[in-house]
């Protein structure tokens, strides 16, 4: 199934507002090490995928057309 926008994906995902800014690196690593999957917009916030277990699914989305 192809999704063309985050709005299409939202009803299909259980999500919670997640801002890791207030957590230290160790806390972020613990959270993402236990994640079943990672879904997010293209950008620097995806750096936490470094903490995922091997073969954890990652879904990245981007706005098209790209904005300058």
Image (cartoon, rainbow, N blue to C red):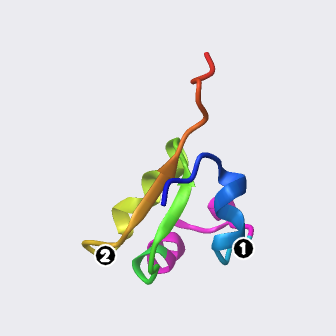
SS label for mark 2:
loop
Residue 29 counted in the magenta span: yes
Q: Which residue is disc 2 drawn over? A: 53
Question: Which residue sits furthest front?
Answer: 1
Residue 25, image x, y percentages = 49, 66
Residue 53 counted in the magenta span: no
Position of residue 35 relative to residue 68, above or below, is below
Q: Which residue is disc 1 drawn over? A: 16
What is the quadrant of the C terminus in the image?
top right
Check if mark 1's residue and mark 2's residue have beta carbons within 8 Å. no
Question: Which residue sits furthest bottom?
Answer: 34
Q: Tell me which segment is drawn in magenta.
A: 17-31
Residue 48, image x, y percentages = 45, 60
How much space separates mark 1 and mark 2, taking CA atoms?
A: 21 Å
Q: Earlier in the sequence, mark 1 or mark 2?
A: 1
The foreground one among 48 and 61 is 61
SS label for mark 1:
loop
């Amino acid at each position: 199934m192809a999704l063309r926008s985050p709005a299409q994906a939202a009803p299909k995902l259980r999500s919670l507002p997640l801002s890791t800014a207030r957590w230290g690196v160790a806390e972020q690593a613990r959270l993402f090490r236990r994640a079943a999957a990672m879904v997010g917009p293209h950008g620097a916030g995806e750096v936490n995928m470094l903490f995922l277990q091997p073969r954890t699914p990652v879904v990245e989305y981007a706005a098209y057309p790209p904005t300058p």
